[in-house]
Amino acid sequence: MNTHADQKHAIRTRGLNLWYGDFQALFDVNLGIERGLITSMIGPSGCGKSTFLRSVNRINERLGYVRIEGRIDVLDQNVYDPTVELVQVRKQVGMVFQRPNPLPISIRDNVIFGHRVHNKGKKASAAEEDEIVEQALRQVLLWDKVKDRLKHKGTELSLEEQQKLCIARLLPVKPEVLLMDEPCSALDPKGTEAVEELIWELKGKYTILIVTHNMAQARRASEKCIFMLLGKVVEYGDTDALFLTPKESQTADYIEGRYG
Amino acid sequence: MFEASELNLRNKRTESLYRTLFLVMTLLLILPVLLILGTLIVKGASAISWEFLFGYPKDGMTAGGIFPALVGTIWLVSVALLVSVPLGVAAAIYLNEYAGENWFTRIINLAIINLAGVPSIVHALFGVGAFVIFFGFGTSILAASLTLAIMTLPVVIVSTRESLRAVPMAFREACWNMGATRWQTIRRVVLPNAVPGILTGVILEVSRTTGETAPIMFTGAAFFLPFLPESVFDQTMALSLHLFVVSTQVPNVPENLPYGVALVLIGMVLLMNSLSIALRMYLRGKKKW
Ligand SMILES: Nc1ncnc2c1ncn2[C@@H]1O[C@H](COP(=O)(O)OP(=O)(O)O)[C@@H](O)[C@H]1O
Ligand SMILES: [Mg+2]
């Protein structure tokens, strides 16, 4: 950490360019995602939203053909710095995927998994673990529903509950940032509503960056909004302002539904 | 309004013709299996007895039992597995979970495919050169099992890889994303879900290894030994070789004896296969994604 720390931003990118092989997916992205806020990212399919998220927690790396230029600072430290330990980055940056992907182990084990991974050697007692599990499940409003079947497999839950479980399992390691890539797109309207409510509930405790192509959702559930098009950031600002008085004509076209 | 037209009827007739044709082909496939089993049982069942299974060969192998060969086969197969399973599973894990797609892994894949196509008699010669002579193991269980292991390695690798591949990528991403290392991910999530598939592959391999004759003939299996092996450096009898010997090399063998040996051999193989199927069904039933 340097001394004149950037306290305002949880994620800060400068001159971020990304290529999949020869194909450039991100163009000169300069973004500062503010701490403690919910920021939504909208834009048509294929504009690079997922790509952006996946480069923040460096999960794109397993594809050998990804090349990155520029820097991404998370909590004021460049995550692409050679001295950075990936495990520590992942601890600070949790990710929720489009399709709920609970592990095929019990609900309890799902929630405690991250905690165990990060605390190897000093095993928590069963009571401590119970406490952690309960707290995490309470935070995602799932505790009352699953408290009697913690031993059941996470994969047996409904999609909505699975997605909540996927959020819950990030919490025990106390991440600063939660990245959510279209977390509701596999859910029905009721499930969507429930998960949105949950995201709102988590506001303030975490910095949340949520990708959605549901504009109503972006409006309802976020304070700041980023509009991307073809790998570039077109507009970034307060959600209300962006929707009511967009500065760019492309933004206006998009929110009025003139792109698919 | 919805009656069949002339064309409909014609299509229907062709349809049922092909259906029957394919059914007959399928039945023809089962026929040899049934015939083999039937012949073995009819001609060999009379040879099977307590003494046959647990006694030693007598009177120049024209009478008595097959116990040393039975025990020898178990030795050979177990030692071969002890070598090929850890090696093969490790290689498969490396290839599927760690290595990227590059010239190096492509060459390895090519090598594996080619290794799988090498005739067993060539493996036998390799075994003689490498294990019997070069490493100085002599003709022994060790040399024979290592030869078998090399021979089965490609199949273990390929089947393990298939089972690893079948584990959804989303599970791995979920784990990595929570900060788990590759190994933690493999141990806690990938392997537990791949085990049924891996086991099935391994057991099918066992049944194939059980029947192999060429690779063990020059490397460790003996025509006749009046005692059981005591260590991996001993020679041993083996069922498959014994079957070859009593059916072609020894005069005056009663007719039912070779059939009896073959029946025991097939019985062992079928037993392993059914075990593998049962295990797979049991483990499949337990997992839910
Ligand atoms: N793994 C990949 N390999 C190659 N190209 C990819 C890969 N993932 C995404 N892309 C391309 O990058 C662009 C951005 O994709 P993505 O970030 O998934 O868009 P979004 O999430 O906004 O729909 C698309 O044109 C897509 O085809
Ligand atoms: Mg996407």
Image (cartoon, coloured by chain):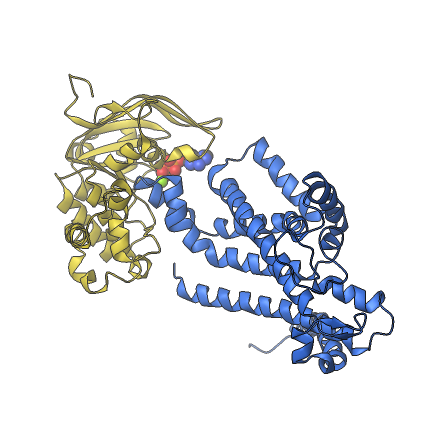
Chain colours: A yellow, B blue
Front position in the image: B229 or A93: B229
Please indicate whether residue B84 sits to the left or right of residue A49 in the image: right
Residue occupying the point 30% across, 44% down:
A182
Percent coordinates x, y for residue A246 in the rendering:
21, 30
Q: Is residue A147 above or below residue B163?
A: below
Residue occupying the point 29% across, 60% down:
A158
Q: Is residue B249 above or below residue B83?
A: below
In the rendered view of the protein, which quadrant contains the C terminus of chain B?
Answer: bottom left
Extreme residue toward the right, this view: B251
Residue occupying the point 68% across, 51% down:
B140
Front position in the image: B34 or A254: B34
Q: Is residue A27 above or below residue B145?
A: above
Q: Is residue B178 above or below residue B10?
A: above
Q: Quadrant of residue B110?
A: top right
Percent coordinates x, y for residue B147 in the rendering:
67, 49
Percent coordinates x, y for residue A35 in the rendering:
16, 31
The answer to whether residue B6 is seen in the rendering is: no
Please indicate whether residue A96 sits to the left or right of residue B260 in the image: left
The answer to whether residue B198 is seen in the rendering is: yes
Q: Quadrant of residue B255?
A: bottom right
Front position in the image: B82 or B252: B252
Ligand 2 picture quarter: top left
Percent coordinates x, y for residue B41 in the rendering:
72, 79
In the rendered view of the protein, which quadrant contains the N terminus of chain B?
Answer: bottom right
Residue occupying the point 16% across, 17% down:
A3
Count all numbered tags in the image, as a single digit.
0
